[in-house]
Image (spheres, grey):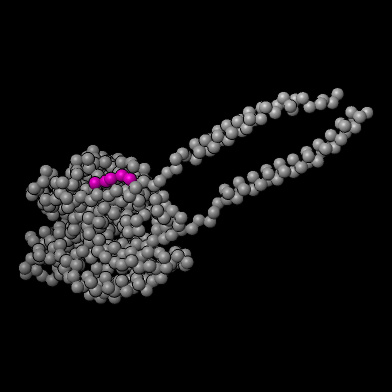
Amino acid sequence: MSAQREMKEKNLWHTPVTIIITVIGVIAIVALVTVAVLQNKPLHQKYKYGIVLDAGSSHTALYIYEWPAEKDNNTGRVEQTHSCKVKGPGISSYASDPVKAGESLSECMQEAQLKVPKDRHQETPLYLGATAGMRLLNIENSSASDRVFQAVGEALQKSPFSFQGARILSGQEEGAFGWVTVNYLDDRLSQGLETTGALDLGGASTQISFISDSFDGSESPANSVTFRLYGNDYNLYTHSFLCYGKDQVLRLVLAHLTQSGLGNVADPCFHSGYMETKNYSVLYDSPCVSDRKPSGAPATFTHSGRGDFLQCQEMVKKVFNFTNCKYSQCSFNGVFQPLVQGPFGAFSAYYFVMNFLNLTDTSIPLEVVKEKLTRYCATPWNEIQQQHPKVKVKYLAEYCFSGTYILTLLTEGYNFTSESYSDIKFIKKIKGSDAGWTLGYMLNLTNMIPAEAPDTPLLPHAGYVSFVTVIALLLFVLFIVSLRPLWPSCSKQPQIV
């Protein structure tokens, strides 16, 4: 009887203990789940912004970049979120009326104010970089160049953004920043992969930049730029050819043609049937050709087309000088260049011209590309206009010339062979961002690319979790073992039968 009473009392004692343990266990589980959910709840991402204006020779474009606010160094990925093409020509075209250069930017600046959150306006850096068009204007008339920059600066200072200034980029900077952009967007810098060369073609200049195993900078220091990015050292070959953008080379070719016929110019780089009256003073108003204007030239000349790719290529070759080279090897005009190496990204006018001509696929043999361009150039002008009724006549008329110039520049100028031509990829964007110098320029000015590789944890996340789990289990086993002296006393407790 006493045994039954003792058993009942023990059961009564066990019941509240069981309930309490159960309640505590449930609370612990709920707390654990709640903490886990809150810990892994997505946080509202905050961003920072940067704006760069690319003031080129033919037009100006605005680019807005965005990156995570808490990762604005080391690991923050910068992405382009918006672009705006400024209406009208490049700012160098407003030399006679500088105020209009600043006014031309207003529409795109208003767009930028809408795209960048208002609470970020004051801290958003705004840069303007001018390239070959302003380089030429500065050579021709430095005071006019200063007035244009003053007008542009005054206009941009009125914006709510943090204006950091406007300046002319050197050709070397333009080439180097284009290389940084291409490789940054392709994640080649952060991962230490083989880099991609950069080929940039504008209206007034062209740039080539790449890493070469045979180039250490000693033979031509002027073409060498050294970077330390993500803990890796890069010795970059880069060169910019002023006056060798497609618009200025067209002037050079026409200037050569007008030497033989002042009134009528039969041009193999334009389609047969094309005819336009052009002004001599307009043709020769650039420093690239101003010293070549023939004496006694009439006010105008008739520019007619003959549509012959091979003859056009021969005319284009005449703007290059392949005879003088004081180095071990040169590209043209006596400029040192090592042999091209690795893959290349060709952007800006390279892409737009070759895309129009349906020649961006470099897996097509180079000879086939030339055959296609030969047929295109031989197509009569009236057929070309019928096939592309929405394209502006000025651009449409020049595609035969531009395509011929690109192939000649790559193969004769930069020495790409039939084999290495296939290493070129014509690109417009990389992962949603425009290929060009602007992103590299902003990354450099904001120090967004670290010189050293970002710090990493001692162990990866999975390794860390495994380590903690093993240590916890080990401590638990040690705790159980430490209680072993108590086990016999526990086993000698009275047993109820």
Q: Nearer the viewer, residue 429 or 446?
A: 446
Q: Residue at point 87% right, 32% down? A: 6
Q: Is residue 59 visible?
A: no
| Magenta region, main secondary structure | strand
Instruction: Classify residue 258 as left or right of residue 126.
Output: left
User: Picture quarter containing residue 64?
Assistant: bottom left
Q: Nearer the viewer, residue 109 or 406?
A: 109
Identify the image quadrant of the N terminus: top right
User: In x, y percent, where is residue 166?
Assistant: 29, 67
Question: Looking at the picture, does residue 103 appear above or below residue 262?
Answer: below
Specify the segment rendered in magenta. 231-235
Q: Residue furthest right?
A: 1
Q: Nearer the viewer, residue 350 or 386?
A: 350
Is residue 162 on the magenta stretch? no
Is residue 234 on the magenta stretch? yes
User: Picture quarter containing residue 28?
Assistant: top right
